[in-house]
Amino acid sequence: MSRQCTHYGRWPQHGFTSLKKLRPQSVTSRIQPGSDVIVCAEMDEQWGYVGAKSRQRWLFYAYDRIRRTVVAHVFGERTLATLERLLSLLSAFEVVVWMTDGWPLYESRLKGKLHVISKRYTQRIERHNLNLRSGKAGTEVTVVLKIGGAA
């Protein structure tokens, strides 16, 4: 016996007719800009896609090591312009130490700041990347973007 779908995209048991478009905040509200200091901020980028792999998106974000929370994020291409958008969101915060992997644009853009380039000191954000990929993070990001493998 086959079941026929008669509601055509409607889910009457839930009382709504279409999926809600999520618009998560790009900057956390848990840390007050200008008053709280971020001692160690890890930055990383992660590849993903929307619907099909031909529609690639990159998630760039900064992670506060002490508070264990995402400070800010942006979606875009893997370019300097996307990194600049993330850094402009982070300009409201006082970051003491930046920790990144070896992507050359981080080094050129963070020149003159206390910047540690090492996979050893980006373990927390890499763990967060793994949680996003496996769906354990519990954030809106996994709904909006299918996270692919590490870059």
Image (cartoon, rainbow, N blue to C red):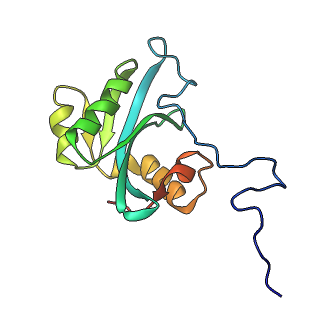
Quadrant of image for the N terminus = bottom right
The image quadrant that residue 53 belongs to is bottom left
The one nearer the camera, 129 or 142, is 142
Q: Residue furthest top?
A: 35
Rendered position, 75 above or below 51: above
Residue 14 placed where, x, y %? 81, 51
Taking the spot 35% from the left edge, 40% from the top edge, the residue there is 43
Residue 78 placed where, x, y %? 26, 48
The image quadrant that residue 75 belongs to is top left
Image check: 61 left or right of 128? left
Q: Residue furthest bottom?
A: 1
The one nearer the camera, 46 or 97, is 46
Rendered position, 56 above or below 80: below
Residue 47 placed where, x, y %? 37, 56
Numbered circles on residues, count: 0
Taking the spot 19% from the left edge, 42% from the top edge, the residue there is 105
Taking the spot 40% from the left edge, 40% from the top edge, the residue there is 61
Image check: 40 left or right of 110? right
Rendered position, 29 above or below 57: above
Residue 46 placed where, x, y %? 38, 53
Quadrant of image for the C terminus = bottom left
Taking the spot 28% from the left edge, 38% from the top edge, the residue there is 82
